[in-house]
Image (tube, rainbow, N blue to C red):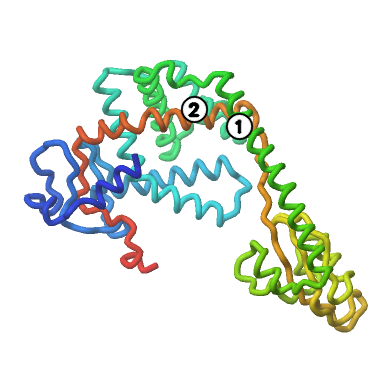
């Protein structure tokens, strides 16, 4: 939905779309995508300014700020040990997705209302259970947590009810097509196993190739030429890696080889997080000892061979959750696009929400 919305907004010719829609007026009431003649970023909007309206349901700047603040509040509760940089990154990303998510959510809630649906009890229980981990960390039951006072808690309570209603709507619309079976989970496991088997076979070939390169080098082949021919590391002409003191080489095996191989020595392929690595000691200065007056330094060249990365087998619960998410996205895509085309979606202040130049960033 977000991608569809973005394309439709970008495709608008404002001069044509905005005829008769000045200063954020609402036009005729017909369905369609309406973009206002003004162009404001969210930071330029007043609290009461409307960012988007979906069939009359308005998201104002104040609503937007409250939603971002609530998302930050929930993130802090779910990830109490997170670093500030992680929180900032999450809030920034959440802010970028909030407007298209609001549009999709309103389309679904309005469709549920049109069908006179109410949240099924099992869907309410499901959504409340999502809060169990947070409630436990606060030493409360889910009911106690949800009934705490405060704007953030009010926002959470509202979201729980709305998401429960959307789950009910999806069940009515898609029925058994939403169900993920044990067979589906086993198929996913088999695909992961097949992928890992392919990685294992590929990595054996890469290992053999790296060993053949070592033999070429020890038979006298020029390291720089072979590195330019074979390495899969980027921006390392002739294989030159750099000059390092001991602490600057993260991989323990490479660190040990760098300070024990003779100058001119070539290592066997070493399995590292970057892949298989062959190093050559170009030069070494100083003494590799804690008592030395001058810390030892080493100049190294290397050849890197990338390896396939094995996938860890998730637990059944995690596989089921991921498959359910993909199935919902697949089933819902065309359906929500249809709801969008029949809706009246208005952006009275334009769609330049995050114009970097206007924010001075």
Front label number (2 vs 1): 1
Count of numbered marks: 2
Q: Name the element at disc 2.
A: helix
Q: Is residue 122 left or right of residue 244?
A: left
Q: Quadrant of the N terminus?
A: top left
| C-alpha gap between disc 2 and disc 1 | 17 Å
Q: Secondary structure at mark 1?
A: helix
Q: Which mark is residue 248?
A: none
Q: Position of residue 355 (x, y in %)?
A: 32, 61
| Residue sitting nearer the eye, 168 or 219 | 219
Q: Nearer the viewer, residue 1 or 354?
A: 1
How many residues crowd mark 2 within 10 Å: few (<14), some (14–19), many (20+)? some
**Where in the figure is residue 345, as x and y percent of width and height?**
21, 41
At 86% across and 76% down in the image, what residue appears? Answer: 263
Give the residue displayed 48% in from the left and 31% down from the top.
Answer: 325
Q: Position of residue 75 (x, y in %)?
A: 52, 43
Quarter of the image that includes the C terminus? bottom left
Residue 252 location, quadrant: bottom right
* Mark 2 in CB contact with mark 1 (< 8 angstroms): no
- Left or right: 37 as drawn, with respect to 207: left
The part of the image, by quadrant, that contains residue 296 is bottom right
What residue sits 64% from the left and 71% below the top?
A: 236
Quadrant of residue 287 in the image? bottom right
Please report whichever mark, 2 or 1, sits nearer to the chain's N-terminal start: 1
Q: Residues within 10 Å of mark 1 (few under 14, many from 20)?
A: few
Residue topped by disc 2: 324
Residue 146 pos. (x, y %):
48, 30
Q: From the viewer's perspective, is 276 left or right of 94?
A: right
Mark on residue 191? 1
Which residue occupies the foreground of this view, 176 or 301? 301
């Amino acid at each position: 939905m977000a991608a569809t919305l973005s394309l439709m907004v970008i495709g608008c010719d404002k001069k044509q779309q905005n005829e008769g829609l000045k200063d954020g007026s609402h036009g005729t009431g017909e369905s369609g995508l309406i973009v206002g003649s003004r162009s404001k970023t969210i930071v330029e909007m007043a609290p009461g300014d409307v960012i988007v309206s979906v069939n009359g349901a308005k998201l104002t700047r104040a609503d937007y700020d409250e939603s971002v603040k609530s998302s930050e509040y929930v993130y802090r509760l779910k990830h109490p040990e997170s670093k500030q940089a992680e929180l900032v990154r999450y809030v920034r990303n959440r802010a970028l997705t909030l407007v298209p998510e609001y549009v999709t959510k309103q389309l679904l809630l309005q469709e549920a209302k049109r069908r006179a649906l109410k949240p099924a009890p099992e869907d309410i229980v499901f959504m409340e259970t999502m809060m169990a981990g947070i409630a436990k960390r606060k030493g409360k039951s889910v009911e106690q947590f949800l009934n705490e006072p405060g704007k953030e808690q009010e926002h959470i309570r509202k979201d729980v009810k709305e998401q429960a209603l959307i789950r009910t709507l999806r069940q009515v619309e898609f029925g058994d097509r939403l169900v993920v079976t044990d067979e589906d989970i086993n198929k996913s496991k088999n695909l992961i196993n097949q992928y890992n088997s392919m990685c294992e076979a590929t990595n054996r070939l890469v290992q053999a190739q790296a060993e053949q390169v070592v033999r070429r080098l020890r038979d006298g082949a020029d390291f720089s030429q072979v590195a330019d021919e074979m390495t899969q590391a980027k921006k390392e002409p002739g294989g030159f890696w750099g000059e390092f003191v001991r602490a600057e080489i993260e991989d323990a095996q490479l660190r040990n080889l760098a300070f024990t191989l003779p100058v001119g020595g070539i290592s066997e392929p070493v399995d590292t997080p970057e892949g298989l690595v062959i190093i050559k000691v170009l030069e070494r200065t100083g003494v590799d000892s804690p008592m030395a007056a001058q810390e030892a330094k080493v100049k190294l060249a290397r050849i890197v061979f990338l390896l396939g990365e094995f996938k860890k087998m998730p637990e059944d619960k995690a596989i089921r959750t991921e498959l359910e998410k993909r199935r919902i996205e697949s089933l819902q895509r065309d359906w929500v696009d249809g709801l969008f085309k029949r809706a009246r979606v208005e952006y009275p202040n334009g769609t330049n929400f995050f114009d970097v130049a206007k924010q001075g960033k």
